[in-house]
Each structure stands twice: as structure tokens, then as C-alpha cells.
Image (cartoon, helix red, strand yellow):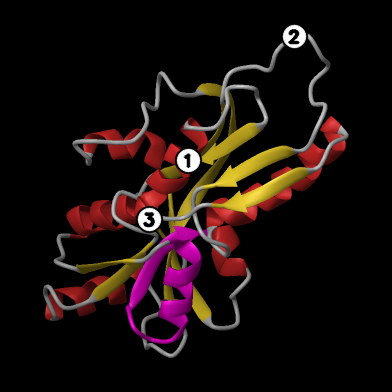
Amino acid sequence: MKNKIFLGACALVAVALVAPAAAQSYPAKPVRFILPFPPGGPTDILGRIIGQRLAVQLNQPVVPENRPGAGGNVGTEFGAKQPADGYAIVLASPSLSISPGLYKKLGYDPVKDFAPITLLAVAPMIVGVNQATPITSVQELIKLAKARPGTLKYATAGSGSPMHMGGEIFKDVAGVDLLHVPYSGGGPALISLIAGQPRWIATTLSSVEALSTTMTSCGIAGG
């Protein structure tokens, strides 16, 4: 049931605005941790786990702040416009590098407006379906998609999101025609899948684990 499919890994990179002023020790007040996707998705899950541990290390509250929309662009632009004092950190998904190739105009410059801190995580993507469907393998999903070209729906966290890119790569590799249904984030996409609206989703293992009783994973990305 876990046939490998090569969709590529999802890299999440923590980025921050420029370093705080050297006149005082950092941090001297709570730090805002901007998450550019809604609750329940892989970015939100990772951000809350890292935020808790970061608060212990910094000895200051690290406050998660969801700013979803436009495949992560709303929250990322919001972070870019915060004071350059080091007290606003953006947890960036691969959308930070994807969006400049998809949108003519962005409200931020991914190179000039941010200073990278670290590569925070690399997460393989999983193809998931609602357990109510008869699909139990990637091969069965491909067979159904070929029998119904252009009608089989798949949910993503939004246009240009890593989930969307994973779905498009899957279409290309499998040679199928699928209908993309973008949502405001991974959480809403998963909820819709459980309700039986789209037929499948490309997401991360962390998102699926929380909903394992209602979802079946039928493939893992990567080698």
C-alpha cells in the first residue's frame, strides 16, 4: 500500500528579518512566529512544535500567528513588512521559491526582504485518500484517473503551494489528467477530503497521522 512515487521532498526553511540592534541582548521581549498557512496543515504543525522548543531556548514567549492566503504569500508579505528588529520570524515553505515563478507581482522580495536562519525540516509527501474510497494503492488511483480524465479532483493548500507542485508532478509522471482544487491551506484541504469532496491529496506524513482513522496513505514521495 505504500508504493514509492517520486514527487520530491518538501523543504521548510525558517527565515527572519535582519538581526536586532546590538544595543540590547536578544530577545528582550516575545517573538512573533508567523505561519503563512491556516491551522492543521504541515507548516502549522511544524511551526507550533518548533515554536514551543524555541521559546525554551530563547527564554521568551514565541507566539504562533497564522496568516494564511494565496499559497503562503499573504503571511510571507506580512512578515516582510514587519520592523527589521528580529522579533518577527516567518516559517517559510517551498512557496518562498515557487511563487516568484508563478506570480508577476509579489508584495515582497524573497532575497532582499529576508535573511535565512536555517533549513528547518525536509518532509516527504504522501498521497492520501479517504478510507471510504476503494483506492488502496497508487496504481489504483492512476487507473481510476485514466478512466475518468479531467474529472478526478485533488485538494491542495493553494495554487503554487508544495502540495500543488507535488500534484502536478504526479500528473506528469503518471500521465494522467486531474482537476486541481485549491484551498486556503493544508488543514482545510484535509477536512474537505475527509468529507469526500476531492478524491485524493498530496500532503505530508505529519498531517495524515493526526487523521489516520479517516485516511489511507497510498504512496510516499522520495527515494
Nearest to N terminus: mark 2 or mark 3: 2
- Specify the quadrant that holds the C terminus: top left
Question: What is the secondary structure assignment of the residue under circle 1?
Answer: helix
> Is residue 77 something one can see in this rendering?
yes
Residue 141 placement, left or right of 145: right
Q: Position of residue 183 (x, y in %)?
A: 36, 66
Q: Residues within 10 Å of mark 2 (few under 14, many from 20)?
A: few
Nearest to N terminus: mark 2 or mark 1: 2
Residue in view at x 39 percent, y 27 percent: 110
Q: Which residue is mark 3?
A: 163
Q: Which residue is mark 1?
A: 78
Residue in view at x 57 percent, y 27 percent: 83
Residue in view at x 14 percent, y 66 percent: 177
Of labels 2 and 3, the one closer to you: 2
Question: What is the secondary structure assignment of the residue under circle 3?
Answer: helix
Task: Please state which amino acid type lies under the numbered disc 3.
Answer: Met
Q: Residue 189 in magenta?
A: yes
Tell me the quarter of the picture where residue 200 sits: bottom left
Residue 22 placement, left or right of 180: right
Task: Please state which amino acid type lies under the numbered disc 2.
Answer: Ala
Question: What is the secondary structure assignment of the residue under circle 2?
Answer: loop
* Closer to us: 152 or 6: 152
* Closer to us: 15 or 137: 15
Could you give the CA–CA distance between mark 1 and mark 3, rounded to whole angstroms? 22 Å
Q: Residues within 10 Å of mark 1 (few under 14, many from 20)?
A: some
- In the image, residue 81 above or below residue 26: below
> Is residue 222 something one can see in this rendering?
no
Q: Which residue is mark 2?
A: 22
Start and end of the magenta stretch?
A: 185-204
- In the image, residue 34 above or below residue 201: above
Q: Position of residue 67 (x, y in %)?
A: 51, 52
